[in-house]
Each structure stands twice: as structure tokens, then as C-alpha cells.
Image (tube, helix red, strand yellow):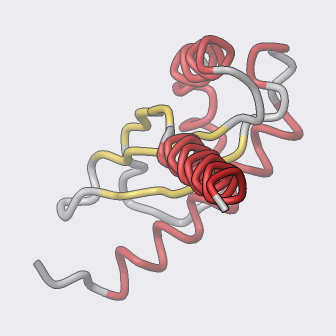
Amino acid sequence: MRDFPRRLRLNTQLQAELAMLIRESLSDPRVAGATITSVDVSPDLRNARIRVSLLADDARLSVAVAGLNHAAGKLRSALAQRLKLRRVPELRFVADVELRQAERVSALIHDAVRRDADKAGRDS
């Protein structure tokens, strides 16, 4: 599917605005430290899926996502005041665990390489 420049601009603008709004206007301690990693607006511009990452364990990330989804109406209202859009998309926050999975796989690979090198050193 071809991605149109308007959607790309909107994704980027929403990511920047949401990051600022979360940092400045939400006082919920559950969302402290949450990072918006990407925004994907649907082709009809009615829905936006926002990926969120957090430098903590998976349970803390789930709590942060729940807090952000709870504040989605407030964030959407603030976006409506800041952006010149006919319709502000519905916001849905989801956990972004891809970075964590990549770190886990990388750690497993490094551990396997280290064990192989240790075993080769003992066999020599």
C-alpha cells in the first residue's frame, strides 16, 4: 500500500505533539518516562495507533499503556486545540516491545558466542 505524504506528515506531527503533551500536561505517575516510538494513522485518518516504549519491565509498560489509554480523551482534546484538523483521530496506545525482544535476542546471541569461545579455549 502506498503511504501518502499527508499521512506521513500527520504521523510525525502527532508523535511530536503527543510526546510534548504527555511530558507537560499529564500528571499521572503511571505514564512517567513513556516514550512515543511511532504513530500510525489509518488511511481514512480516523484512528491512530501509537506505540509506546518504557525503560522498565513489561508489567510497568502495561501500566503506562493503560494510563495513556485512560488519558486518550484528554490528549485528543488537547490535540484538537493545537492542530488544524477537520477531525482528530481516535487515539489507541499499544506497547512497543520490539526493542526489548531485539535486546533479548542480542543477549542470547552474545551469550552463545561467549560460551562457544570458552568451550573452544578449553578444548585447545
Is residue 85 placed above or below 95 in the rendered structure? below
Q: Residue at coordinates 58% horizontally, 53% vertically from top-left?
A: 116
Taking 124 as reference, is 105 left or right?
left
Closer to us: 29 or 119:
119
Q: Residue at coordinates 46% horizontally, 70% vertically from top-left?
A: 10
Q: Residue at coordinates 66% horizontally, 41% vertically from top-left?
A: 78
Taking 1 as reference, is 79 left or right?
right
Q: Residue at coordinates 53% horizontally, 25% vertically from top-left?
A: 73
Pinpoint residue 85: horizontal percent, then vertical percent: 45, 62
Taking 119 as reference, is 20 left or right?
right
Pinpoint residue 62: horizontal percent, then vertical percent: 56, 16
- Location of residue 65 (image quadrant): top right
Taking 54 as reference, is 12 left or right?
left
Pinpoint residue 117: horizontal percent, then vertical percent: 66, 59
Q: Quadrant of the N terminus?
A: bottom left
Is residue 123 placed above or below 21 in the rendered structure? below
- Location of residue 66 (image quadrant): top right
Counting labels gives 0
Closer to us: 90 or 61:
61
Q: Quadrant of the C terminus?
A: bottom right
Closer to us: 56 or 71:
56
Q: Residue furthest front?
A: 124
Pinpoint residue 109: horizontal percent, then vertical percent: 54, 53
Is residue 8 placed above or below 77 in the rendered structure? below
